[in-house]
Amino acid sequence: MLPKRIIYPLAILLMAAACSQGPKDPVDQKVEALLKQMTLDEKLGQMTQICFSEITLTGDKNLDMHPELFREAVLNYHVGSFLSGTGPAQKWVDFVTDMQRIAVEETRLGIPLIIGIDHVHGANYVDEGTMLPHNITLSCSFDTDVIARAAAITAKETADLGMVWNFAPILDVGKNAWWPRLYETYGEDPLVCAKMGAAFVKTYQDPQYADPYRLAACAKHFIGYSDPRSGHDRTPAEIPDQILYEHHLPPFKEAIGAGVMTVMANSGEVNGVPVHVSYKLLNDLLRKELGFDGVLLTDIKDIFKVYDEHRGAFSEKDATLRAIEASVDMSMACNAFTFIYLMKELIDEGKITEERIDQSVRRILRLKFDLGLFDNPYPRSDRLHRLNSDEHVAEARKLAEESIVLLKNENDLLPLHTSGKRILVTGFAAHSKKMLNGAWTLEWLGAEEERQPENMRTVYQAISKEFPDARVSLFETAADGSITSEGTFRNAVNQNDIIVLTLGEEPYSEFRGNISDLNMPPQQKRLAELAGAAGKQVIFVLVQGRPRLITNIEKHADAILFAGYPGQGGADAIAGILSGRVNPAGRLSFSYPRYPGNVIPYYHKEFSKPQNLYEFGHGLSYTRFTYTNLRVNNTTFTTPKQEISLSFDVSNTGQREGDEVVLAFFRQERGHITRPVRQLFYFDKIHLPAGEKQTIEIRINPMEVFAYPDENNQLILEEGEFTMMVGEMEQVLTYHK
Ligand code: BGC
């Protein structure tokens, strides 16, 4: 019992709190105090985000401010947020310092700005930034620690430059191989996307990497963006609710659980409704069901696009009203102030209330307070040595080494024995940094070679360094892989023993990557045929954002690597795998189809068997791992939460140490609706010295693992059999109430 002298003041305090009208949380109090002073115009400005291209001298992302245009945006329109620039670190610091000074010192209330950026593979819009592998590559590590390490580097290199809001991670499930943003995803599996997305959010928002700043991540693009029927960007997706809940929702749910502060809406349409105006998906699902109360941002110009591109509204005003009704907080209006005008009209007409505006402005101010912007709005330049530090550069290489996948290695061609041999490095990415870093590197479509990191090697340079005892030469092709003379190419091939042929895709972003043929482009296929016809040892290195089909040319290669877009350490990682310095451990985080007419994720239903060239999870090592001894503590469970313990042994039975990706799947044998033939429920990466064994123990909560959303979106766990699958082993569990 509390002593009396404590009870008395406590009672007074409690009574005072109960009587007071305002919020108790100190940040809420600050938000309310500020909100009370704001005019409607100031509030609408906070809800508006404008592109740097509207406030720079050159009208692009370069960091040279046009002071009049900027002042007009901030002083006349009260704009509270800006996005997207590119340039050297010091210029970022100066630019954002100038911006913040004007916002803080020259506006009536001194509310700091919040600056957004797409740092989706490292601090990729900063000249000195360390360009990390893109997500499709990283996800092949099946290691959430890899994602956390990448997020930590990104946070450290971004924090000091004033961009506190990162439009990452992408949580769209990459289940459509045509989709031009597949490379931005963590692959096709919902669990992998969920765990990796959450790892990114937790690390990126962890104050320790940004201190004294705070950073916000942005879960995007909510929801159903990644599976458009045509495969083209931002085209209609038709996704039954059941699939939406089972496949697309988990990554967002997990990110919200991990505390993600902001969400960006999907600029496509789902089931005929542009998502930006979908009350059902934004208000009901995101806000109510998932309980997300942070800032919901539109994608670029997307309220306008609902009207102009989707034709899903009668006017831009109609689109604005419906987006606000659907619970959007901030419009990434980018290049116009129309949003502000239209909002005012809607308020005048009584269609939007000021309470509704306050709701969004509250969230935005809260974000700014939580990020410490009011106390610490200015960037700093005393720690710029953190960018591209030796440590980060070494990590960039390691992340690529841990992620690149060895798809084929016939007759153990790799590791290469090269003494006295001649190696030809060729193909579109043989001597290019741009191809390895991919898009979103200093420019939306990837910057030209001159702007790519200096301290980075091309594949040709890395192979030359890796194999000092070999004679390495280069045969360059055009950026699309075409050549002017087949004869010259043939001669070059004939003069060499080993041909390293890079195949794949030049960097592309969003709709610029739309294709209608998943096959490897014909000119590149031709190179593969010519290389194959010469009877040499041929290695394909696939540098690409999605699985371009190689079914007809795969036979020409003795070894094949999937590199994705491996970033600035990519070439060294590729060379290291070829030489054996690195024992490859990446596994495919997506299915690699055999035919363009048969592209289905591995968790397909029984009647649509995929015909893949390489399965989800496929990847080779220079050692061998065997799985034995699958056992469970109980083969029957009787309640939904009864813990089941499953264990098995993984042994390295080869000659060298290595990393192994451990994947465990299950299949619900029968359900009242069709269930996937296989479903991943556990993944991890382990390290095993040669000859050693490790026992893996997994504890399962049946409700978490086996339950699924039914056709009414209700989570159900059905009685019956569940087959657990690890390696070649299976074990049936029965649920019987
Ligand atoms: C993309 C978003 C990105 C935004 C800002 C849009 O085109 O869809 O993913 O965050 O641009 O750059």
Image (spheres, helix red, strand yellow):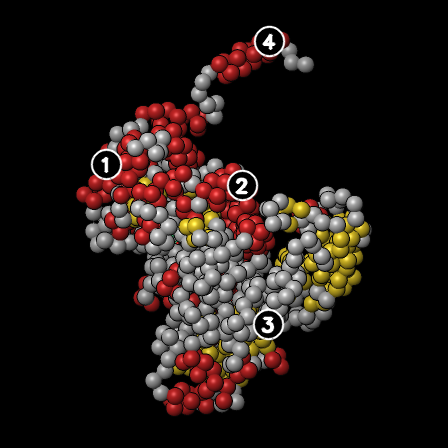
Residue depicted at 61% across the width and 62% down the height: 604
The residue identified by callout 4 is 5
> 599 above or below 310?
below
The residue identified by callout 1 is 75
Q: CA distance from mark 3 to mark 1?
A: 59 Å
Residue type of the residue flagged with mark 1: Leu
Can you tell which of label 1 and label 4 is closer to the viewer?
1
Q: CA distance from mark 2 to mark 3?
A: 36 Å
Check disc 1 and report its element: helix, strand or loop.
helix
Marks 3 and 1 close (CB-CB < 8 Å): no
Residue 176 at x, y percent in the picture: 50, 62
Residue type of the residue flagged with mark 3: Gln
Marks 3 and 4 close (CB-CB < 8 Å): no
Residue type of the residue flagged with mark 2: Leu
Check disc 2 and report its element: helix, strand or loop.
loop
The residue identified by callout 2 is 290
The residue identified by callout 3 is 611
Q: Residues within 10 Å of mark 4 (few under 14, many from 20)?
A: few
Q: CA distance from mark 2 to mark 1?
A: 37 Å
Q: Is residue 372 visible?
A: no
